[in-house]
Image (spheres, helix red, strand yellow):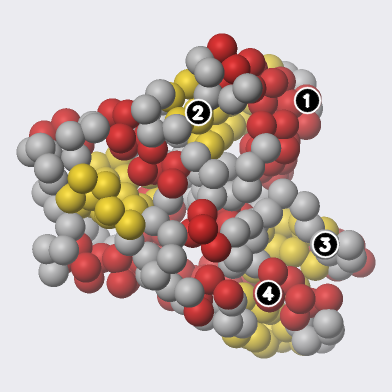
């Protein structure tokens, strides 16, 4: 049996597809890669929050819905809150390190005033403006290789990226992890999502990492409560340890940042909703929302 896997054609996307392909082939399946060009690939210079929700996933999912592919593979942080009818989240392999990192010769506190920092994320930009308002935050788009090339060409004094992507690509470059208290990661950062019809769920059972799935579902539930899509200035991170889900959520408008935490043995859905309600209350108290 051949399984057709739809995904974007970037280097990082291909590395993620490799994880799924290797698993399927170890189970005796043939695989075929179906490369999909997305709207986000065509508008490479626009900030992500201006393009809209789900820009990296819509066309990829359509390939599955239209029968051109059997499953889709995504960076889960780029997915919108709800999947289209007919598709389900089948598996999440073990999560890679979810933190943001500053690629720079100097740590964040050591950078001189007016240093130019590149990021394509409104969340990262707003968090950075709160911590170091003296820095110059500039938009940067493109895949990881493109961003690193711009940094190496000294177009920026530093750029903020996801550690997970750098690890999956095997990039060896000086970088500094950013504290999750100050730089709460994008919801579902470091998680790969395999999406397809429910009838294929059994095929991916052994690929699915239960702890990662629980973290993913809790983070998605928080996003649902707070509102906003995958490119809003919202950070959410849950970690499962000894059956306890510990979560942190942050929101910033670039002037103020609010952060809340929760620790519970409840289900991911309950944990995520609780954290979301706490954040909404804190946002109202600080005047960030009506």
Dot 3: element: loop
Vertical placement of residue 221 versus 78, above or below = above
- Cα–Cα gap, marks 1 and 3: 23 Å
Q: Which residue is mark 1?
A: 270
From the viewer's perspective, is the residue at label 2 or at label 1 nearer?
2
How far across and how far down the image is residue 27, in percent? 73, 73
Q: Earlier in the sequence, mark 2 or mark 1?
A: 2
Please tell me how crowded label 1 is: few (under 14), some (14-19), or many (20+) other residues with Cα within 10 Å: some
Dot 4: element: helix
Q: Is residue 143 visible?
A: no
Q: Earlier in the sequence, mark 4 or mark 1?
A: 4
Dot 2: element: strand
- Cα–Cα gap, marks 4 and 1: 30 Å
Q: Quadrant of residue 67?
A: bottom right
Residue drawn at the location 89% of the way across and 65% of the way down: 86
How far across and how far down the image is residue 150, in percent? 21, 68
The quadrant the N terminus occupies is bottom right
Residue reaching furthest to the top = 285
Which label number is shown at residue 60? 4
- Cα–Cα gap, marks 3 and 2: 28 Å
Q: Is residue 209 visible?
A: yes
From the viewer's perspective, tell me whether residue 16 is left or right of residue 223.
Answer: left
Q: Earlier in the sequence, mark 2 or mark 4?
A: 4
Which label number is shown at residue 84? 3
Q: Which residue is mark 2?
A: 250
Residue drawn at the location 68% of the way across and 74% of the way down: 60
């Amino acid at each position: 049996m051949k399984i057709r896997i739809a995904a974007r054609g970037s280097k990082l996307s291909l590395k993620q597809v490799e994880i799924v392909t290797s698993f399927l082939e170890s189970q005796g399946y043939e695989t075929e890669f179906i490369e999909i060009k997305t709207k986000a690939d065509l508008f490479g210079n626009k900030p992500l929050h201006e393009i809209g929700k789900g820009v990296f996933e819509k066309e990829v999912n359509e390939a599955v819905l239209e029968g051109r592919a059997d499953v889709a593979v995504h960076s889960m942080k780029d997915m919108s809150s709800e999947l289209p009818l007919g598709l389900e989240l089948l598996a999440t392999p073990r999560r890679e390190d979810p933190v943001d990192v500053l690629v720079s010769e100097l740590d964040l506190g050591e950078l001189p005033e007016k240093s130019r920092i590149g990021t394509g994320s409104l969340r990262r930009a707003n968090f950075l403006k709160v911590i170091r308002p003296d820095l110059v935050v500039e938009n940067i788009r493109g895949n990881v290789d493109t961003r690193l090339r711009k940094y190496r060409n000294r177009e920026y004094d530093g750029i903020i990226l996801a550690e997970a992507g750098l690890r999956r690509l095997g990039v060896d470059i000086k970088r500094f992890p950013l504290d999750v208290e100050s730089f709460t990661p994008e919801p579902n950062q470091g998680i790969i999502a395999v999406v397809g019809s429910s009838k294929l769920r059994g095929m991916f059972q052994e690929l699915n990492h239960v702890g990662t799935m629980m973290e993913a579902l809790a983070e998605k539930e928080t996003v649902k409560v707070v509102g906003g899509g995958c490119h809003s200035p919202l950070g959410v991170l849950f970690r499962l340890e000894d059956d306890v889900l510990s979560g942190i959520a942050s929101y910033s408008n670039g002037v103020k940042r609010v952060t809340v935490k929760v620790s519970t043995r409840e289900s991911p859905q309950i944990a995520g909703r609780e954290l979301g309600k706490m954040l909404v209350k804190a946002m109202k108290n600080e005047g960030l929302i009506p």
